[in-house]
Amino acid sequence: MGVSAYTMTCFFKSRLSCFWHNISVGNMASQVREIAQSNGFDVCDEEFARFLDKKDELSSCRLEFHYPKNKTLPPVDLTLVDGEEDCLYFCSNSLGLMPRKAEEKLSVEFQKWAEMGVYGHFSGDFPWIKCDGFSILPSAKLVGAKPGEIAIMNSLTVNLHILMVPFYRPTPTRHCILIEDKAFPSDHYAVESQIRFHGYDPKDSLILAKREEGAGTWTTKSILELIEKEGERVALVLFSGVHYFTGQFFDMKAITEAGHKKGCIVGFDLAHAVGNVPMHLHDWDVDFAAWCTYKYLSAGAGALSGVFINDKHTNNPDLPRFCGWWGHEMSTRFVMDNKMKLSPGASGFQISNASFMTASALQTSLEIFDRIGIEKLRKKSLILTGYLELLLEEKFSKDKNPNFYVEIITPKDPAQRGCQLSIQVSVPIANIKKELDKRGVVCDSREPGTIRLAPAPMVNRFHDVWRFIRILEDSAKTIVACD
């Protein structure tokens, strides 16, 4: 290599290093374009995607997960794609991929069950009697909590109901629950049923924060104004951390502060936020939160849920709660005298013992998150999603492609989104989804007319994004030709 070539290579690496490690949360698409241009690439070139992957310090994380091949996916048409090629998995916002070590770890626990039976509760490196406890510390780091504020138990909607026992206590003057419009259906159903259980009518006691007129998302300003206006009759503000449909990352700190200013309890459903975006629940003074662990955290379908309860609440024994054996402190749990002695912290809200199977899978996944850290994942996520945004705009803007165009409804501001981009397309959603399915793209669609794309930094590469754009072009040509 000549001196000039060596100097140029060092310059390119320096520019990318600066971009990668000192990334600003600004217009990500323009920043990706800048790094492409400064390194002599067109943003649409396949080589640019490969270049980014070579410089990605997290690229090897994908090898720690089972990644499906095209040939193993039921809807794939193997006349259109190479069956031995990896599929394009953009669906970690629905179900995360399986960590390779989960299979090994579960095998150990199944063998222990086979050989020891009940003694498995107390034996080995992973005694089942405290299997949930192994995930507390890494979970606390992910959500910005103290370990004593975390419990691993039940499933998400069950936990929301359990948490509304102490935290939704309506009175004749303060009986409303405020949630976002088009909240995830399970949250909406849970809230309505809690209102009815307490003798109120959702028509009077459920307040929906509406999206901006003509926009697909909310503004923080409009949410805070609604809390200011209605807060004195609101008992509970219960928002998503990241909205499942739009991918919008809400300003949880501002919402919490506004709710507390009006005397409201403030809680969050973090199903689409945990493992996706950094959070600081304790410092933000959030009252409570719950999340599932089978999406970005890759603990498997139906896995245990996580719970955060601010320590200003956890040690109040007079706080109403539904009790069970597992909320009794460990040291005297087996005395069996029917005299409840609550475990300190959030664990005092547990009811039943956890499944060692899902607890084992969760621990395996959280070990990977704990080793890498959410901040590094967030940096890659910003670039990965910015790259997807840029290519969608380059290839599928209405002025460039009037026969098939795409509108991104997720906020353009990277600070207001995680790794999900929700897009609406100019053709019937079922048609384009069918073509993507046949070509090995794993994503999901949600009515009305939206496809949710979630290139997760743990398992996705920049070349996946480039391939997706090429497949979307091919799918669009097929649909347009048929029309």
Image (cartoon, rainbow, N blue to C red):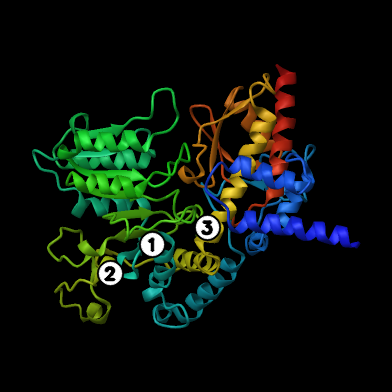
Quadrant containing the N terminus in the rendered view: bottom right
> N-terminal of the two: label 1 or label 2?
1
Q: Which residue is mark 1?
A: 144
Q: Quadrant of residue 454?
A: top right
Give the class, few, some or many, for how many residues have Cα within 10 Å of label 1's Cα (few <14, many ≥20).
some
| Amino acid type assigned to the residue bearing label 3 in the image | Ser
Amino acid type, residue under disc 2 in the picture:
Trp
| Residue shown at 46% from the left, 63% from the top | 358
Q: Earlier in the sequence, mark 2 or mark 3?
A: 3
Q: Which mark is residue 326?
A: 2
Nearer the observer, 370 or 100: 370
Marked residue nearer the N-terminal end (1 or 3)? 1
Q: Position of residue 196 (x, y in %)?
A: 19, 38
Residue name at image x 23 percent, y 34 percent: 206
Q: Quadrant of residue 280?
A: bottom left
Q: Position of residue 315 (x, y in %)?
A: 19, 68
Question: Residue 307 appears in which quarter of the rendering?
Answer: bottom left
Looking at the rendered structure, the kind of residue marked 1 is Gly
Dot 1 falls on a residue whose secondary structure is: loop
- Determine which residue is flagged by label 3: 298
| Whether residue 87 is visible | no
